[in-house]
Amino acid sequence: MTDAVLELGHEPQPVDQPLLVVEGLKKYFPIKKGILVNRTVDHVKAVDDVSFEIYPSETLGLVGESGSGKSTTGYCVLQLLKPTDGSVRFLGQDLTKMNQGDLRRMRREMQIVFQDPYASLNPRMTVGDIVAEPLLVHDIGDRRLRRRSVERLLEVVGFNPDFINRYPHEFSGGQRQRIGIARALALNPRLIVCDEPVSALDVSIQAQILNLLKDLQGEFGLAYLFIAHDLAVVRTMSDRIAVMNRGKIVETGPAEDVYSNPQDEYTKALLAAVPVPDPRKMRARRAERRKHRAVLAEPI
Amino acid sequence: MALLEVEDLRTLFKVREGEVHAVDGVSFSVERGKTLGIVGESGCGKSVTALSIMGLVPVPGRATGSVVFDGKQLVGRKQRELENIRGRDIGMIFQDPMTSLNPTLTIGTQITESLRRHLDMTREEARKRAIELLEEVHIPNASGRLADYPHRYSGGMRQRVMIAIAIACNPKLLIADEPTTALDVTVQAGVLDLLSELQSEHGMSMIIITHDMGVVAETADDVIVMYAGQVIEQAATLELFDQPEHPYTEALLAALPQIEGEGVRHGRLNAIPGRPPDLLTPPSGCRFAARCAYAGMDDCAEVAPQLREIRPGHWVRSQHPASERAAQVVGVR
């Protein structure tokens, strides 16, 4: 390792080899009853037999409504939740069978950006410490190298490095999300799971962050698992899209195909429900979505 | 005469650091049976505008100006008198159906409360009417669900209950503050359909406050765009979406990701640089100047633009509205 700053980006990877292969992923949460004897009476099948792959430098958009299991899928990929069944192969190795030490080393290659930029940054740590924490945890470099790396990372995400000693509460949602992205980039990962990264932001700021994520992907060859409920946001970010409903992927394909020619009834209903900023189109869309009402029986 | 006429509404919060002009000279009117959309981003003053109309501005806020509802001036009225209007003549729906219902009271109690308060119904009459209301907002098995507590209802159902409470006394005006923001798109579609259905049945006027241009396009007859406490553009909905004039409105529409169109994956969104100004110390000139693509060659930063009628019924607060920019060929950077 040089003593300048940490390198970002990787050697070009063969794009015909998937970076991540998820097969038959299941995550069941037990429903328990009883006080003394905890019997498991049933399971909530949050993720139920989900398979997909992500290639280097690619974005797979995972879209669905609340409770569809999309975030749980993201957590299971990173082994932040232990899957009930199935395999998650990353760079050819099955993460579900790894021991803690190997998994920890593997985590350098895969990071996460969370939804809520207010809750995901420790309010008692300075911006510099937050971004340096992954380096510290993985015991990378000395204090000076880490300091310089943090400055570089903040520059990369468009955050003024002069504010390195300030605290998160001094910044707006968009600025905080930049801090979160810098932290995710610190270990030079190949894959970032973006879990609703812009849903807490205003439209004008949302566009800034989405552009930043696109730029970083182009610059460093990142692959994204991009999880969001906003179909338009997912569309602008993704090469391919997987639509989730009740724990299952109901449709997957190239982004433009899924949106222009949806095959699954649920996907059709979901797309028809999106309000578009065009009053002339709304009348036709309204009729369209009434047709799909039956598919979307509201849970009581 | 319009049902609601708001004239030069100003809402001021005195805080330790100074004065925050959350709403700074807002005027508009709502015609009977029509829907007005108020759109803008966080902190633009759209919610405070609604609270000011109803006299619900929290301390240390204070609203001045004129709010004439159905011929009656609301500003400066006693809380007691306002209470007779709120919930009866003006219904309200708030953003978060999870927190705006009382978790310790049954749905039935919460619906009958306003019926008994405003319409002097007996317990039995109110109960009957509550069942009708729940049926009207399409809650299945209405009579059986009256005794349930809010936690037994899903988010979409709770918002339907909120709507039932809001329309209980047949209000003339319904104010909905981000009524669908916390809901999934499919549930949102159902709630918006319900609102338009109820509006045509009851002939009420609506104010829909939202950050979502799609919701405005779908529901509103007229639109107000707010920025930093001021109205920066106002027009009929079709007119506004066909020919947006203010650079901020244009930029906001351009910044929206689309579900249609090709090549979006490798294009960039048109982000608006920077952030809205701090309302403690608002800029003396145009409030959008620092983020505007067309400011800079004029005195935008010094002279505050006035709201002016650029076409009949289309008002804009900018020195560089789109149609005038097209005319002056020079100097757009």
Image (spheres, helix red, strand yellow):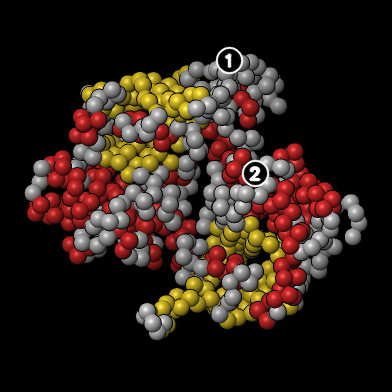
Whether residue A166 is visible, yes or no, is yes
- Which residue appears at 40% of the width and 44% of the height? B178
Mark 1 vs mark 2, foreground winner is 2
- Which residue appears at 22% of the width and 34% of the height? B83
Does A274 sit above or below residue B120? below
Q: Quickly name the residue at label 1.
A: B303
For the C terminus of chain A, the quadrant is: bottom left
Under tag 1, what secondary structure?
Answer: loop
Mark 1: few/some/many CA within 10 Å (<14, 14-19, 20+): some
Q: Is residue A128 left or right of residue B184?
A: right
Mark carried by residue A167: 2
Kind of residue at badge 1:
Val
- Residue A16, percent across and down? 77, 71
Q: Is residue A262 left or right of residue A138?
A: left
Kind of residue at badge 2:
Tyr
- Chain letter of mark 2 equals A
- Which residue appears at 73% of the width and 75% of the height? A101
Does A146 sit above or below residue B299? below
| Residue in the foreground of this view, choosing between A69 and A15 | A69
| Residue in the foreground of this view, choosing between B264 and B79 | B79
- Residue B82, percent across and down? 23, 31
For the N terminus of chain A, the quadrant is: bottom right
Whether residue A235 is visible, yes or no, is no
- Residue B154, percent across and down? 35, 61
Q: Is residue B178 left or right of residue A201?
A: left
| Residue in the foreground of this view, choosing between A172 and B134 | A172
**C-alpha distance separating marks 1 and 2:** 36 Å
Q: Is residue B157 left or right of residue B246?
A: left
Does A196 sit above or below residue B117? below
- Residue B117, percent across and down? 16, 42
- Chain letter of mark 1 equals B
Discs 1 and 2 share one subunit: no
